[in-house]
Amino acid sequence: MVLFRSIVFNVLFYVNLFVHFVAAIPTLVMPRIAIVKVATFWGRTNLWLLRAICGIHAEFRGVEKIPPGPLLVASKHQSLWETFALLWMFSDPAFVIKRELLWIPFFGWYAWKAGMIPVDRGKRGQALASLTERTCAELTHGRQIVIFPEGTRRAPGAEPSYKFGITHLYAETGATCVPVALNSGLFWPRRSFRRYPGTIVVEVLDPIAPGLDRIDFPQRLKHDIETATARLVAEGERELERSGVPGASLGSARSPH
């Protein structure tokens, strides 16, 4: 049943993506916020498809902790899920993305139009300077900059690997940073088309106000996100065990390969 539902969802996921790609064409000549709203609606329809087809629900905790206005948002990254599911939480989000994504037809056009922030990972120091410049510019427009501090997806239970970028942005921009923990990788594993029924939990943690130094901030950020994520993963594992879904084992969900 999991396999069948996963296949149906994956087909409809890409159909839904194509429909929104076509529907969003007029936004290319509209104000930027139009494509952000279309993307947010696309994210909500994906959440509905997951719930209706795969039995995957989403619970968002602590959203009331998000301050209004410009922010840095540092989110755990376990699967593709959070790239669309977090959109609705913010009034005007700008995701930090790989520059290569801008080369994808339609997606790249809309990401550019939406003011997403591309990073050329191969240029390192130059990339960090460019990232800082773009982030400061978007913050002045009141946007919420969503960055995945580890730079890529990490399976639940994998050793965390936080990069310097988020610390640099926090120090240079003077913006409040909102940490986000989640357990999406248990139900939407990376590099797998299977979708396991259960409840993906996102938890917004206490904001980190400006003022910490470059040593204390990354330690605080990592501690807060990893502690909360471990708790959410344990919660999700118990739910998977109770469900008895074949194949939804800790080993398959946690594998870093």
Image: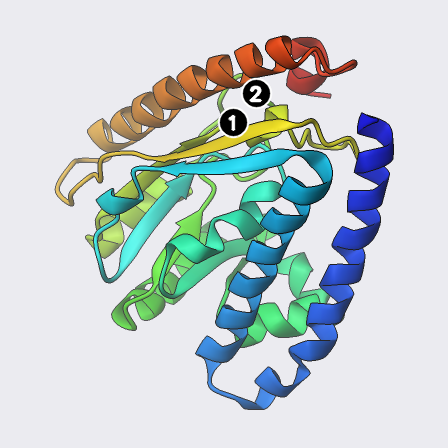
Question: Which residue is at 45% across, 36% downward?
Answer: 59
Question: Which residue is at 35% across, 68% downward?
Answer: 138
Question: Which residue is at 45% across, 77% downward?
Answer: 33
Residue matched to label 2: 156
Provide the secondary structure element on which disc 1 rests: loop
Using residue 249 as the reference point, say whether residue 1 is left or right of it.
right
Type of the residue with mark 2:
Pro
Using residue 239 as the reference point, say whether residue 143 is left or right of it.
left
Do the residues bearing badges 1 and 2 touch, measured as CB atoms within 8 Å?
yes
Provide the secondary structure element on which disc 2 rests: loop
What's the CA distance linking mark 1 and mark 2? 7 Å
Q: Residue 83: where, in percent of width, then height?
A: 56, 49
User: Relative to 40, does residue 252 appear above or below in the rendering?
Assistant: above
Q: Earlier in the sequence, mark 1 or mark 2?
A: 2
Question: Which residue is at 44% across, 47% downward?
Answer: 147
Q: Residue furthest left?
A: 211
